[in-house]
Image (cartoon, rainbow, N blue to C red):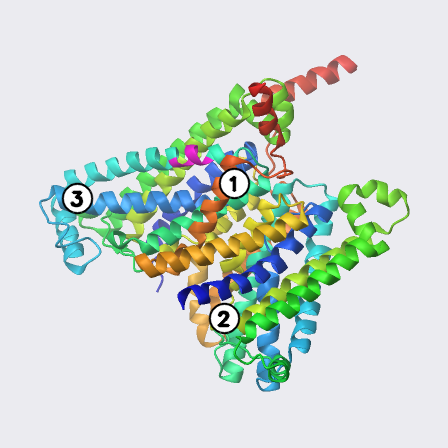
Amino acid sequence: MEIYRAILCSYVFSWIYILSSLPLTLSYRTTKVFNFAHPIFITYGAYVVIIVNEVLGREIPLAVAVFLAFVVGGLVSLISHLLVFKPLSYQRVSSNVYMVTSMGLWFIYQYVLYIVCQLLTRRYDVNFLSYSTIEYKDVRFLQDVLGLNSMPQYTITATLIGVSVGVALYILFNKTVLGLSLRGIADNASLVAICGVPINRLVNLTWFLVGGITALSGVIWVNFSGSTTPDLGLNIVVDNFAAAFIGGLYSLPITAVASIVLALIENMLLAVLNYYFGVQPTVRIAIVFGIVLAILVARPPMGAGGGLPYRFIKRVSRK
Amino acid sequence: MIDITGFLINWLEYFAIYAILAVTLSLESGISGITNFGKVAFFGLGAYLGAIINTYLLLAISGVDVVKAPPYTAEGVIALIEISTLNPALVLGVFTLSILVSFIVTGVFGYLLTYPIIRVGSGFVGFTLLCVGEVLRGIYVNMEFVGGTNGMLGIPQPFIWLGIPMLSGLCYLLLSVTILALTYIVTDRILGSPLGRTLRSIRDDDIAALCLGKDVPKIKSKIFFLTSGFSGVAGTLYACYVSSVNPQMFVTLVTFNVWAMIIIGGSESPIGAIIGALILTLIERILPLIASLNEYLPFTPDYLRPVFIGLIMTIVLIKYPRGLISMKPPKFIKSAVEELIREAS
């Protein structure tokens, strides 16, 4: 039973990590901004669904949840870019300044959400600071039609959202001129600009897509977890960054594979440790950190934002 | 009625502790280019080490059975209060030992951490160190001998035997300011030395420094040992001042606050870091006074603090990316520039 539960958790967490770490890699490739506020998009995606669900009387369909989360997550991301990151890029600041600013944004967004949740809790007399699971009525209908009632709803939700986003991203990047331009900006922005591509507009679009896709993790989360809190992003931040980090913040396929492997290792290991030794789930972060450290020591990922010289020296000295 | 003297001592104590963190972060991040988003890890480790030594060791030396009356229980706390008021030499001795041990252990911990992180770029360094802080917090929660989630209480302040709270507070403040001064002097000496120039060159372009024959990883490791050590000392000072530690004290928000200090003051200048610490600790000490607004506001006023600090930090960074107080160029650069101008004219 424990193993079955661990497998289900691994499956859902794989999709959550994929949907949050792929956009992180995408944003770093295109904009070279290491955005510490990235996990807040997950939280905002989850809370948009929660708030609308409460306003509609707990009967929100998945399609509406996905649309709202995508738009709100995308807008939050775009506003962050236009008001903060873009002005910073004009100043030609170092990557450290970007990172610190994104950390500032993270705390602003998080505590604004705390304030909103407290106001809503007073207004609706429901605990928004720790909200219970949301069931999507259209997914329930789909389960009834297909006879999948024995399956937990969150597995179907995760599959629907994950596969749709995966296919959409594949088509965007491989079959459209827009995707080609986005990849071009990631590789050499100046060259793309010379070719007449409107870089600013495409960078804005990238930020919108990044925020929107990440917010979809929140839509899965509220269907899966029994308690959603404004700290949601903070709890996922390490796994999210670790997956992107293993992909070297460059390779989308490696990031996706890393997300699946991370989710599998941490959930299975946690289940085993909990069953045999009574270890608490709080060690989850230590497991992820162990994996990251092992990778750092054994083989730092390619393109790891400046890690090349030391590896280069090592290779030269060996020769 | 507000107790002005008590408020001042309390504010300056917090200022001295946070200024140590800010000065060391300025040396790490502003001057050496090590993006430390895990400052709280070293601060917390120092605090827990200080708490363990100042409680367990004190009880053990005084002949109390720490297995029967561990310091996180009521019996342990009562025994600690009795010992610390009756035995000044022992309390001061154990406190001094805890400061030394904190410096060495957190320093070595920082040094060891540089092995994996110096291989990657600044974003990854920041992320890895942020993880370290969260992992350590997870460890504290699961360690029963440090009180788990509840933490430890009754950590003796080393001057509590003086009997007068104001006097003991003042003595402790003097001690903290002395350690701050020591941190500043060490940082300033490094900045003015050839090592300081090397550090700045590494920050500006580590590949160029590497090509010029500078052992970049080794230099970064040494600096990280020093700054981590001082952060640990700040942690011990904090634990003994507030007389308690628990995992909720060492969240990422602490790191963020220290970053805000060096950004407001100017990340490249230790003086700027001290000024930033002075301003932000004052704001932090004043904000609880507006907690009385609780009945007028429909939400907890505590949530306003991070929003407020985050806004200041973001606005300052957009307008002045180098902080409000940029570092003046060193004298030798000034004179060289003057000489060039003279020659040109």
Question: Front-most of A69 and B185?
Answer: A69
Q: Indicate whether residue B285 is drawn in magenta.
A: no
What's the chain of the residue with tag 2?
A
Q: Which dot, 1 or 3, sits closer to the camera?
A: 1
Q: Which residue is mark 3?
A: B58
Q: Which residue is mark 1?
A: A295
The outermost residue toward the left is B63
- How would you classify the magenta stretch by its main secondary structure? helix
Q: Residues within 10 Å of mark 3 (few under 14, many from 20)?
A: many
Q: Indicate whether residue B112 is drawn in magenta.
A: yes
- Asked if residue B294 is positioned above or below residue B7 in the image, the reply reads below
Question: Front-most of B285 and A68?
Answer: A68
Residue in the picture at 59% in, 22% down: B331
Q: Which residue is mark 2?
A: A225
Residue segment shown in magenta? B109-113
Could you tell me if the residues under marks 2 and 3 are in contact, i.e. CB atoms within 8 Å? Answer: no
Could you tell me if the residues under marks 2 and 1 are in contact, i.e. CB atoms within 8 Å? Answer: no
Query: What is the three-letter code of the residue carrying label 1?
Result: Ile
Q: Residues within 10 Å of mark 1 (few under 14, many from 20)?
A: some
Query: What is the three-letter code of the residue carrying label 2?
Result: Ser
Q: CA distance from mark 2 to mark 1?
A: 30 Å
> At which x and y percent is residue A234?
51, 58
Look at the image and tell me in which quarter the C terminus of chain A lies: top right
Q: Inspect this view and state whether residue A199 appears.
A: yes
Q: Residues within 10 Å of mark 2 (few under 14, many from 20)?
A: few
Mark 2: which secondary structure? loop
- Asked if residue B29 is positioned above or below residue B138 in the image, the reply reads above
Query: What is the three-letter code of the residue carrying label 3?
Result: Leu
